[in-house]
Image: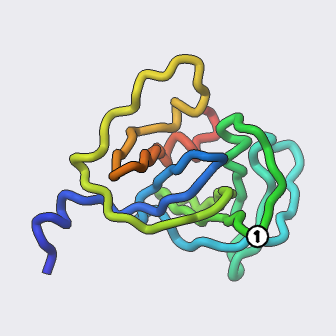
Amino acid sequence: MVTEAALLDIKVIVFKLMDKEYAIPVDNVRSIEKVLHITRVPKVSSYIKGVINLRGVVTPIIDLRERFSLAQSKYDVHTRIIIVKLDQKEVGLIVDSANDVLDVPLSSIEPQPAVTGSIEADFISGVAKLDRRLLIMLKMEVVLDNNQ
């Protein structure tokens, strides 16, 4: 049975890039993987690191730090690839770490603040305030759009 409160929440996967926490709807997430061998692909955008063979499926991999024009860092034991699916696209997103699965009340999500000069602002749908945490909600359709 679905409670009325559950209809007012969105379940999200929380992950980190640098010192910020981001969230994407669990409905878009297929799996979370450790970093696997990535095969480079020539003549693609620099943020596309290549492809992986994940259980027989060739999946393109995007480094979100580079996608958002953030400082690069070496992959470590906490680095994860979040496999997301949107429409018929399946893509892996490299993140610093994947932390939590949370229920976020829709009432706690505010529209994206006006940020001037931030490239990453194009990718943000809103910000959720939970206790002392700020979760940056991503627009997956824009993150996965090569034309942005």
Asked if residue 141 lies left or right of residue 5, the reply is: right
* Residue drawn where x is 58% and y is 64% of the image: 98
Q: Quadrant of residue 37?
A: bottom right
Q: Which residue does the image show at 34% across and 45% down from the upper left?
A: 129
Question: Measured from the top left, where is residue 142 in percent x and y?
Answer: 52, 40
Q: Which quarter of the picture shows residue 15?
A: bottom right
Determine the residue positioned at 12% across, 72% down.
3
| Label tally | 1
Work out which quarter of the rendered image holds the C terminus and state it.
top right
Rendered location of residue 144, percent (x, y):
58, 47
- The three-letter amino acid code for the residue at tag 1 is Val
Q: Where is residue 16? Give x, y as percent.
A: 59, 54
Depth order, front residue of 58/28: 28
Residue 39 lies left or right of residue 82; in this view the side is right
In this picture, residue 7 sits left or right of residue 35? left
Q: Residues within 10 Å of mark 1 (few under 14, many from 20)?
A: few
Q: How is the image coloured?
A: rainbow
Q: Residue furthest left?
A: 4
Q: In which quadrant is the N terminus drawn?
A: bottom left
What residue is drawn where x is 56% and y is 46%?
20
Could you tell me which secondary element the residue under label 1 belongs to? loop
**Among all residues in the image, which is located at the extreme front?**
132
Residue on which disc 1 sits: 77
Image: 83 above or below 94: below
